[in-house]
Image (cartoon, rainbow, N blue to C red):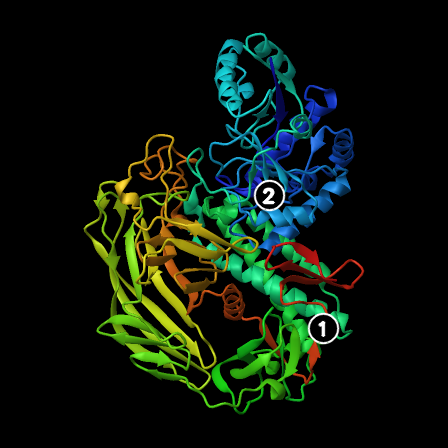
Amino acid sequence: MKEVTAYTHTHWDREWYREFEEFRLRLTEVVDRLLDDLKTGKLKSFYFDGQTAAIEDYLEIFPEKLPLIKKLINEKKLFLGPFYCLSDVFLVSSEFLMRNLEIGMAKSKALGCADFIAYLADTFGHSKGLVPILNYFGIDKVVMWRGLPDMPSEFMWHKLKAVNLQRGYFQNIFSDENLPSTKKAEFLQKELNLIAQNSSNAILLPIGGDHLASPKNLEAQIAEVNKLLNGYKIHQGTLFEYFEKVKNNHKKKFECEFLDNSKTFLLKGVYSSRIYLKQRNAHSQWILSRIAEPLQAFFHDLGLTPNYQKQLDYAYKTLIKNHAHDGIYGCSTDKVHEEMLTRFDKTDEIANGVTDRILTKLSDEKGKYSVVNLSNYDYSGVVKILSGKKIKDAQLVGKRRAFPNKKLYNIDDVPITEDIMTLYEYLKEVKDVPAFSVRTLSESANNAKSTLTVTEKSISNSNIELSVKNGKIEVFDKVKNKKYKNFFELTDRADIGDSYNFGALKGDKPINAKLTETKILQKGDIQSILRLVYEIKIPKTSNPKGRSSKTLQHKIFVDVILQNLSDYLEFSLHWENHAKNHILQACFNLEERIEKVISEDTQGVIVREFSPDYDIYKEIPAERGKELKTNSAPFQGFAGANGFCAATKGLQEYETEKDIFKLTILRSTGLISTPKNPSRGTPAGPPIEVEGLQCLGSASANFAIFFTDDIDKMYSNKEKFYTPVVCIERELSKNLLENKQTKDLLIQAVRLDEAGKLFVRSANKKTNKIINVK
């Protein structure tokens, strides 16, 4: 007789195919029954999906239930955390996953829950970069499902004791009151037989599913089913009890990521659904965690500015609410994603507001400037100066009318119409500003003669050149003396899929954009811009029968930006999307077959292998219950192959085909889940039509390309591309992290702790171990 530990749970999405407040109405109903069942003993225990946000959302409506919730937690009947909300692990930065855990664990402990398992039952694959994060928080247990191949129910994942949910987390057989016990037993007999194939005498059975309440009369139902089962006996228990039962079973060890879709759907199309959300998230994460927070921490520690940590903590929590997986995936209703955009706006307002206040507070208005380098690497490049004064030996790139910050942020004054002034935006070139330091512009100014040139057909400096020859793009890596011919293209194909999976159309052929015009957009000794204008006729829509005969003309403006000291080319694209059901990709011809791709992972880097000859168009349609493999994968800030690398701002899906490296810059579909996706043989969610998923209207993409095999160079160029420097109107020279860093560390967080003291957290670049520097 095999013992079956049945744990009761609900998988709670704050927002998905219904909006947050609608789901919260359901949440109050689910939690009301749950609390009553636990209080009366009808239910022995309940696991709340590894998060705390749902209980927080409930308590905002019913704060009077707090004592009961604390009592049930203390009695080990209700388990919360460790996460604040269930985030994706590939689309969100390491620091924000850590803040997610910090908030979730603090909230859980405040309610009395101190026992934690990393519960990852519905994340779409598992990044090995999550392991050092969990290690840092002392979490040594993990529950997993999607992305795992055929493997034991218990194993070691690096140093974590892992449990594989063999048949997934969704098991609602006990929620159907009208189904007779004989049918329930018949179904469970088959399920348990399948789970048992990779299990010991101890078997784990989830009871619950998406947004489900606790089953009524569960103990009585289990008793009836147990009479009919052959070889199994089910009893209510907890995940912690199960881990104790199998504590000696974690024998096979894996040290890898899990992105295998042979047993479960990975739904990898979410990495390019509603790309605009990923772009906003990348921007918000950077300005909050890498600009505003370290800036205020350093200068408060020097006694020069106020402490804004509480305001920034609020911004973190606001942004993390957008990291709930169905949100950041882009597979929810339009109203859900509209609310997400509001949260991005709120986060940016706080981050920019704190930054501007600090820079204003530091300013002595004497017309002397210093540059603050918040990067892990020494900085040579451009710093932007926004000033009401005209500055010599700088490149003017813009101006606008606005209130001066001294007026705007003075709480003893109110700006009036007469205070509006002209603000000029300048570029100033600096060189060799040490990592985490402040240097005056006079100390760091680059006085060397510029090598930057631009014509209507080319743009170049001493490191790199892009030229247009016979309507094709050629790039010359001057450092390695290597030319890449027909290097860059824009390609469109049909996509008859949905928010979860790209849908390949049988017989579909790529449509390439044609370069029709070039012109100089900006000419300077510090920065120049060459505009490339592409035209492409995209079919109005696509469906399983083919692409429509009617085509819509699209103009795509590609601004190639190059700075004098830079060794990368920045591409800034913008266009209006008028077509539906298609995918647009930026393609880079690397001349040699791509078999390996290196990219930034959640923590550290990862190398993935691909078959250059794999062709999904030869595999469609997928069999029922199967999801086709792809040559695409997620990444954080950079990815590349064969000595080529691209750093991106929120483009987080790459694909390889033979010798071509592709970045997805737009994926336009119209259903959350279509039952007729040729790349996935079974629906993955509700077939709800969502117009916003087509991403009609204004679209943009930003990335930089360079040539290197050096990982440090990939990191440093990514940080430089994201702009890690700010300018203050003050003369100051200071090492901000003197004696607190080594060449093997990447600083990931600089903040103020609860006592207002400087706190620095870093990761070892070789081991990925996360440590507190101070």
Residue 485 x %, y %: 28, 69
- Considering depth in this image, is 761 or 211 the residue closer to the camera? 761
Does residue 72 lie above or below 770 as drawn?
A: above
> Relative to residue 605, is residue 507 drawn left or right?
left
Mark 1 secondary-structure assignment:
loop
Residue at mark 1: 738
Does residue 21 lie above or below 642 as drawn?
A: above
Mark 2 secondary-structure assignment:
loop
Res. 699 image quadrant: bottom left
Asked if residue 421 can be seen in this view, the reply is: no
Instruction: Locate the C terminus by quadrant.
Output: bottom right
Q: Are discs 1 and 2 less than 8 Å apart at CB? A: no
Asked if residue 291 can be seen in this view, the reply is: yes
Res. 104 image quadrant: top right
Residue 590 x %, y %: 33, 63
Q: Which mark is residue 65?
A: none
For mark 1, does the 10 Å Cα neighbourhood hold few (<14), some (14 to 19), or many (20 or more) residues? Answer: few
Residue 486 x %, y %: 27, 67
> Relative to residue 676, is residue 405 drawn left or right?
right
Residue type at mark 2: give it. Answer: His
> Relative to residue 303, is residue 328 drawn left or right?
left
Gap between marks 1 and 2 measured at Cα: 34 Å
- Considering depth in this image, is 730 or 643 the residue closer to the camera? 643
Mark 1 vs mark 2: in front: 2
Residue type at mark 1: give it. Answer: Glu
For mark 2, does the 10 Å Cα neighbourhood hold few (<14), some (14 to 19), or many (20 or more) residues? Answer: some
Does residue 538 lie above or below 231 as drawn?
A: below
Residue ID at (57%, 70%): 724
Looking at the image, is mark 1 or mark 2 earlier in the sequence? Answer: 2
Residue at mark 2: 158
Does residue 36 lie above or below 229 as drawn?
A: below
